[in-house]
Amino acid sequence: MKFSTRTSYALRALLCLARSGGSLSLRAIAQTERLPLKYLEAIFADLKKAGVVRSLQGSSGGYRLTARPQQLSVLTIVSALENPKETLYCLSPNGKKYCSAGCHCGVKTVVNKLNKSIAQTLSKIKLAALIE
Amino acid sequence: MKFSTRTSYALRALLCLARSGGSLSLRAIAQTERLPLKYLEAIFADLKKAGVVRSLQGSSGGYRLTARPQQLSVLTIVSALENPKETLYCLSPNGKKYCSAGCHCGVKTVVNKLNKSIAQTLSKIKLAALIE
DNA sequence: TTCATATCATACTAAATTGATAGGAGTTAG
DNA sequence: CTAACTCCTATCAATTTAGTATGATATGAA
């Protein structure tokens, strides 16, 4: 398992935000975390869409968390960023290219169990727990 | 989380092998599972290197499992195929590009916990459990 | 011994995903 | 008005992954 750089950046930026207590501009975050500003913008677009952060436009604007770090789980953050596409080829035995809902091939069983386990683990880790 | 096509193919091929009880040629597996033969060869090279299968060359040769399906865990299979590279950018606070062993940033904490959880889950699922 | 059928090795190509950049339009406090 | 923001869209580059091509080597069987 590995996280995409995208998710890794997001976690660090949100930790930064959580530590600050209030709101920060992306420029400020990019500077302290040494991340590319324009890339951060794209990431925060996703985070906003997922409801993890709220934005304030205009001069002296920025982003703030919508929930307290004690409430915000890593699962929520990861889900906002990671590409959810599940490519599960399953040509057998019916010759169709993708698993259908009714298909109970072994591969799908593994993926389902794993997904459940991952979600459970990540939902237990709150952002607050990651601040030293 | 998603599996690569590579891992998905491997699981299906090994299930095929497990069901047969003995040894099968890749051609036979490719045919029943409708997988590209040459791609299967590459996959089985990895599986062999990891000690999951044994090969028998020549005419009427093929592959067989080295362990019984009751013993073989999905973790072993996945580990043989998935790219283990962990890219964990961590420019802050010291400006280095990658997390060092001593770094305890929040991102790393998450990854470590998750890796442990995944390994635990996958090691409990044996190949035999996936055969209907 | 010859031949068909295997594994094995290497190189290459194509497609998809991901990381990152560019330029500018709309907002808003000072 | 302007500086400092968010926001929007398009594009490019790097990396990873999927799949193909070609052929060498091994071996059981006719």
Image (cartoon, coloured by chain):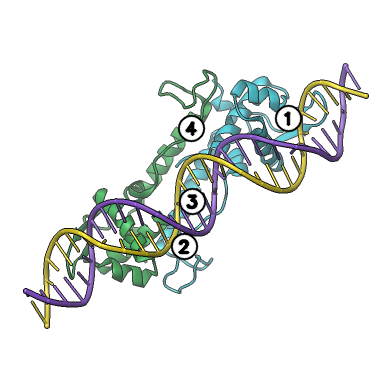
Chain colours: A cyan, B green, C purple, D yellow
Residue A86 seen anywhere in this rendered image of the structure = yes
- Is the C-beta separation of discs 3 and 1 under 8 Å? no
Give the SS element for disc 3.
loop
D25, A107: nearer the viewer? D25
Quadrant in which the C terminus of chain A is drawn: top right
Q: CA distance from mark 3 to mark 1?
A: 31 Å
Judge if badges 3 and 2 mark residues of a common chain: no
Amino acid under disc 3 = Lys
Q: Determine if residue B64 is in view.
A: no
Give the answer, above or below, for where A122 lies relative to B29.
above
Q: Quadrant of residue A68?
A: top right
Alpha-carbon span between mark 3 and mark 4: 19 Å
Distance CA(mark 3)–CA(mark 2): 12 Å
Q: Can you identify the residue that label 2 sits on?
A: A89
Query: In the rendering, at what x and y percent does residue B97 appear?
Result: 49, 26
User: Badge 4: how crowded within 10 Å, few (<14), some, or many (20+)?
Assistant: many
Residue A129 placement (x, y as % from top left): 55, 27
Numbered circle sitting on residue B2: 3
Residue type pointed to by label 2? Tyr
Q: Amino acid at mark 4?
A: Leu
Residue under numbered circle 4 = B88
Distance of mark 1 from mark 4, alpha carbons?
24 Å
B14 vs D11, left or right, is left
Query: Circle 1 sits on which residue?
Result: A63
Q: Do dots 2 and 4 share one subunit?
A: no
- The picture places residue B29, in percent across and down from the top left corner, at 32, 68
